Amino acid sequence: MKINPRVSEKIAKGLIWSAALSVLAVLVGIIIFILAKGLPIINWSFLTEIPRNMGRSGGVASPIVGTLFVAAVAVVLAVPFGIGTAFYLAEYTRENAVTRIIRFSAESLAGIPSIVYGLFGFIFFVIYLDLGWSVLSGGLTLAFMILPTVIRTSEEAIRAVPDTYREVSFSLGGTKWQTIRKAVFPSAIQGITNGVILGLGRCVAETAAVILTAGTALRMPASIFSPTRTMAIHFFILAREGISMDNAYGTAALLIILIFFINVVANALVNRFVAKGR
Amino acid sequence: MKKFKEKLSGRVFFALALSSISALALITVFIIVQGVPIIAEVGFVNFIFGMSWAPSHGEYGIFPMIIGSVTVTLGAAILGVPVGLCCAIFLSEFAPARLRNLFRPAIQLLAGIPSVVYGFWGLLFIVPFIRNVLGGPGLSILAGAVILAIMILPTVISISEVSILALPRQYKEGALALGLTHWQTIRSVILPSAKSGIVAAVILGVGRAIGETMAVIMVLGNAVAVPTSILDPVRTLTTNIGIEMGYASGPHRQALFATGIVLFVIIMALNSTAQYITRKK
């Protein structure tokens, strides 16, 4: 039996629309559910008190600080390496065997599961380098994890800078380094920042890699050598062990708000970047 | 001075560019050094095909976990890939501009939400639904597959969409000019031409599903047994590590690293295939 093309057109269109709208509905559903349950929990003392009684009561001040600490260490460490790699790939070399190996490594790093980063971070940073469960171990592990994100987005941003910028700089007698510093970098900075922010988002959302490297300590981290727990870990432990559903919802709502905010900032940067390019 | 700076900057950028190679090498070496001794001790075949995982008795067989990972991932692909592909076609072909501008950031947000939140949501909604409607304990392959299907959507959608949008406009215009309907054009011209990108999207999505840990710990039930139905609880390679790493030591910990090696090898094979397919184009 042959279906009339007009009928199959309608069926296909209907299926595609309904698939797309149901994905949107699921996303909105999850977010609204978490916010509806979690927002009422969030108040000043929830944000400023450290967890008491394993998280049954008290707030999430130390997991918030832990998250920011770990993410900051990761970003500070990954950014120079990521941006440096991007400039090397985009400005200093043609495609050759070395760039192929670099690209292969970066893309492989992007695909490695976070639990494997956790295993590696545990044995290398926590045990071998003897940093223990700490902000530093967690941040170092996450730096490895977000490196490919920073490389990819930075390289795209650098390649999007029009060649005329470089030509003008060279024609004025600028060296390669001067051209990069004064002509390419300033116009690529927004795109690069977008990549860094996306990396930051991955750090905030990550659980498996940090639970094995930063630990699960509840107290306020005193330095980068202190063990800590991030908000995602705190939420995981509260929810999985059924310690406190209310505090779990509150933590999850905070996480979603943070991720949402990070995404909005990243998108705003890209849009400005695109607008400027025109 | 200028020349010196010029030379120095080139060297510095090159040194920084070696970071990803060294990172990959470090990870590979440290995981392998930790895990290989126990595989050698137990025997490769016994480790991979062994049915019993009892670290307290020195039994390390991960076959049930391999089956667990494969079934959950397969389920996620069966559920997630068609939906993801539909979304990619929707975004590139059907969506009105305003809806598209809403949809893209939404997908990005979907990718950014912590995986533990999906697991928690699954535990509260999917697991009870399966228990009440389909029977069994609810904590099951099916529950894990549903959660992972949602979690791989951003990967499948964004990579497929990029490969559809990269096609020359003439392909579509030619087909429409020949009198094909929009759907016939998509089916017989657009999808076949974008095939390699879509295949890469599916492979990378599968890679994400097989590597996910924390979300599935919450919904799979984590029993070490070969499942007989999709309503049975299972344990995957990742959850095996995630659950036991917190307290493991000695040979037990090494066995978890060995589990990591198996996972690592699977992922590297998937990634290399995806990279090969996209390069060939």
Image (tube, coloured by chain):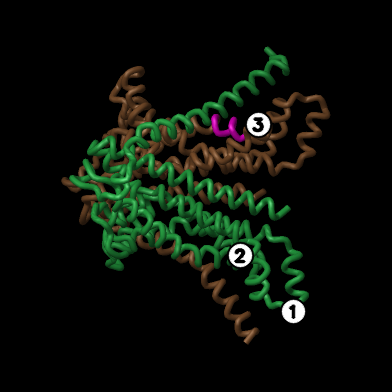
Residue drawn at x 60%, y 25% as measured from the top left: A17
Q: Which mark, residue B16? A: none
Q: Chain of mark 2?
A: A
Q: Which mark, residue A89? A: 2
Rendered location of residue A163, percent (x, y): 74, 64
Rendered location of residue B61, percent (x, y): 27, 43
Q: Few, some or many C-alpha atoms within 10 Å of disc 1 (few <14, some 14-19, many ≥20)?
A: few
Q: Few, some or many C-alpha atoms within 10 Å of disc 3 (few <14, some 14-19, many ≥20)?
A: some
Q: Which mark, residue A173? A: 1
Q: In the displayed structure, would residue A106 be above or below residue B167?
A: below
Q: Few, some or many C-alpha atoms within 10 Å of disc 2 (few <14, some 14-19, many ≥20)?
A: many
Helix, strand or loop for disc 2: helix
Q: Residue furthest left?
A: B57
Colour green, chain = A
Colour brown, chain = B
* Between marks 2 and 1 in the image, the one whose residue lies nearer the viewer: 1
Reply yes or no: does residue A146 show up in magenta. no
